[in-house]
Image (cartoon, grey):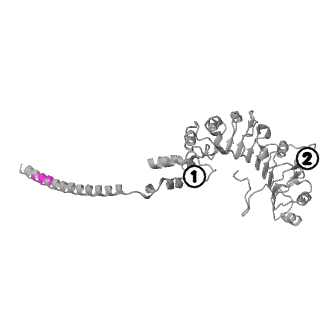
Amino acid sequence: MQEDRNLLATQDSEILNIQDQAVALLQKLFVLQEARNTVHKRLQSYKYPVLSLPNEIVSEIFLHTIPDYPNRPPIVGNFSPFRLTHVCRKWREIAIATRRLWRAIKLINEDDMPVDENGSLAAVWLDWSGFLPLSIHAGHAGDWETSFSVLLPHHARWEYVNLYLDGSCDNMNEVSFPLLRSLRLSTDGEERFAPFINIREAPLLHRVSLNHVGPDMLDLPWEQLTSLSVKGTCAYEWIPILRETSQLVHCEFSFWHSDFDDTDIIEEFLLPRLETLEIYYLSDSAQQFIPNLVAPALRRLSLPEDLLGDDPLESLRSLVTRPNCKIEDLRIAYAGRPEAVYRAELPSIKRIITFEGGPRSQPGDPPSYFEGF
C-alpha cells in the first residue's frame, strides 16, 4: 500500500511539472502568434512590384510572352496566353482586356492534330480579340467543319491565314476577305475535293502558298499577287495562271511531275517584276519553261540542272546575256558539273552554288525567301 502512495505522489508531481511546462509553452505560443500577426499585417501592407505596375505596362509584358504577330501561339499548353488568366484576378482582367494577345490563333499542335475539337476555346479566344485583324492556322482532316464554323463568322478580320481544306469548305465562296494579305491552303494530296473555292474578294491579298491545291480548285486575284509558292501539283496547268501574275516578285514551284510532253508548246510569257524564282522537282520534259520565261528583274534563280536542257551552260549564258538580265544569285540542284565550271563560264553572277542532290542550306547560306511561308 505504501508503494502505491509513493507512486501516486510521484505521478502527481510529474503532472504538476508538465502543467507548468504547458503553461510556459502556451505563453510562448501566444507571444509567437502575436509576433506572427504583426509580421503578417506588415506584409499585407506591402505591394509587390509587379502588382504595383500600371495595367498598360503589365499588358506590354504579357505581349512579350507570345510570338511576334503574325506568328501564332498555341491555343493550349505552357505558351498559351490562356495561362495568364489563371494566375490571379488582376492578371486575368488585364489579359482579357489586352486584345493583341488574342489576335493570332493556332488550332493544331506540333503534330498538326486538332487541340480544340469542339471549338469552345477558339470561340472565347476570338471574342477576346475584339475587332483586330486575325492570324489563323487551323484545319485538319476530320476537324475542318468544327474549326470553320468558329472561324468563318470572323472572315472580315482574316489577315494571315493557313488552312487545311477538305470538302466542307464551300461556304468560303459566299464571303469576302477585305483584310486578307497572306493565304496558305493545303490538302492531303490524295484527291481533288469537289468544292471550287472563290477568294476573288480579297483586295489586299498579295502572298499565296498552295500545297496540293491546283488552279482548277480555286480562283484568286492572281493579277495582284506578289508572292506565289506552289507545291505538289502539275506544272503545265500553271502556265496560263502565270500569264496573269504580272505583279509577281517571288515565285516558287515544287512539282511531283511536270505533265509536259514533247508536243506541248509554251509561248513566251512575261513576268516583268519577278526577282526570285525557285524551282524544284520539275522534270526535264519542261525544258521549254526557262527559255520562254522573260523576267528582266530576276535577281535570284534556283533550279535543277536538267531543266536547263542538254547544254546547261549554254542555256544559262543565253539567259544572262539577255538585255537587262541582273541575276546575282544562282543555285543549281542535281548538278553534274563542278561549281568551278559554272563560275568560270558565268563570271557576271556574284554567287553560284551547286548541289549534287537537292538544294540544302549551308553555313552562312541565306535562307530561301519562302522558308516559314
**Height in image: 260 above or below 278?**
above
Question: Residue extending furthest left?
Answer: 2
Question: Residue 84 at x, y = what percent?
Answer: 50, 49
Give the residue number, with chain letter if any, for mark 1.
66
Give the alpha-carbon distance from disc 2 to disc 1, as whole Å: 49 Å
Residue in front for this viewpoint, 230 or 110:
230
Amino acid type, callout 1: Ile
**Height in image: 197 above or below 295?**
above
Residue in front for this viewpoint, 174 or 71:
174
Q: Residue at x 74, y 46 (%)?
A: 208
Residue in front for this viewpoint, 172 or 341:
172
Q: Residue at x 69, y 52 (%)?
A: 372
Q: Residue at x 14, y 54 (%)?
A: 14
Residue 49 located left or right of residue 267: left
Residue in front for this viewpoint, 66 or 257:
66
Give the residue number, with chain letter if any, for mark 2.
267
Magenta extent: 9-15
Residue 25 located left or right of residue 77: left
Q: How many numbered marks does the figure carry? A: 2
Local SS, label 2: loop
Query: Which class describes the residues within 10 Å of circle 1: few (<14), some (14-19), or many (20+)?
Result: some
Residue 268 located left or right of residue 62: right
**13 within the magenta span:** yes
